[in-house]
Structures are given as C-alpha cells and as structure tokens.
Image (cartoon, rainbow, N blue to C red):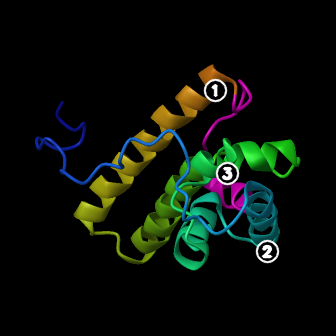
Amino acid sequence: MARMHSKKRGKSGSTKPYLTEPQEWIPIESKEIIELVIKYYKQGSSQSEIGIILRDKYAVPSIKLVTGKSVLEILKENELAPSTPEDLLSLIRRAMTLRNHLVENKKDLSSTHGLKRIESKIYRLSKYYRNSGVLPKDWRYRPENASILLR
C-alpha cells in the first residue's frame, strides 16, 4: 500500500522474529522488569525510552514477551499512565517546533507544507483516539493551546 503523503511504497526493514516464549538467556525476572519500568517512568523517561533502556542496559529484547504486558499496561496497573498517548504528544512537539521556526522564517514554504502534514496526522490520530475512547470525545487539538498539553 502506498503512503499517504508520498507516492512511494514505504521503506523496507527487518522484522522481529516470531516468538511466543521469552528467551532463556534473559537475565532479569518479570517482577524486576516491572519495577524498572516504574522507576524509569518516575524519573521522567517516556515509554519508548524505557524500552530502549531495558534493551540496551539490561538485555531485555521484548518487555511484552517477558512480562506478558506492554509498558503502557504496566503503567496503567500502577496508575501512572499518561492522559494523552505518547505518539500524539511527539507529533504535537514537532508541530510546535515548526511553528516557532515559521515565526522567524515566514518564507520557508517547505516547512509550511511540513507543518500541514504533521497537523493532518495529529487530526487523524486524535480522531482515532477519540473514537476508541483513549481521549475524551470533546478533546480537540488547537495550535494556540498546544504548549499547555506538553506540560
């Protein structure tokens, strides 16, 4: 299937091997992984950063394979889950940095086009999250109030 914002078919990449059980060589038990997830989230790491830290420092290739839960599920069980999803917040951050760039560089047309693309992704993703119940039905993205969301 072709991409929405380009005529290309996407980029190829490696896929994870299909595994149903955790590997025997993983040095950490599932309880320790849950404690590490909570510890790093309280220190201010995002969910994706936690996965990268556990992969690189603790040799845990997949948190979900070992614990049976994703990072978000672990955070929800411990009542630490963020109110807005991480992917939506990262798109909003990108849009804010582009808006700040366009204040100083008004004639940068490629950045203007990029901002439109990013904001259309935000609108589509927020519509999905509203329909699936992750965000409240009255939640709307407004560029003027975006800085309040990121605090």
Q: Which residues are magenta?
A: 134-151
- Residue 5 in view in this figure: yes
Q: Is residue 17 left or right of residue 48?
A: left
Q: Nearer the viewer, residue 71 or 62?
A: 62
Q: Are dots 1 and 3 in contact, CB under 8 Å?
A: no
Which labelled disc corresponds to residue 150? none
The residue under label 1 is 130
Residue 105: within the magenta?
A: no
Dot 1 alpha-carbon crowd within 10 angstroms: few under 14, some 14 to 19, many 20 or more: some
Q: Residue at x 11, y 41 (%)?
A: 7
Q: Secondary structure at mark 3?
A: helix
Which labelled disc corresponds to residue 71? 3
The disc, 1 or 2, on the residue closer to the chain's N-terminal end is 2
The disc, 1 or 3, on the residue closer to the chain's N-terminal end is 3
The quarter in which the N terminus is drawn is top left
Q: Residue at x 69, y 66 (%)?
A: 28
The residue under label 2 is 43
Q: Is 111 drawn above or below residue 79 in the view shown?
A: below
- Residue depth check, mark 2 versus mark 3: number of the one nearer the observer: 3
Q: Main secondary structure of the magenta part?
A: loop
Q: Is 2 drawn above or below residue 99 in the view shown?
A: above
Q: Residue at x 27, y 69 (%)?
A: 107
Q: Position of residue 97 (x, y in %)?
A: 49, 69
Q: CA distance from mark 1 to mark 2?
A: 29 Å
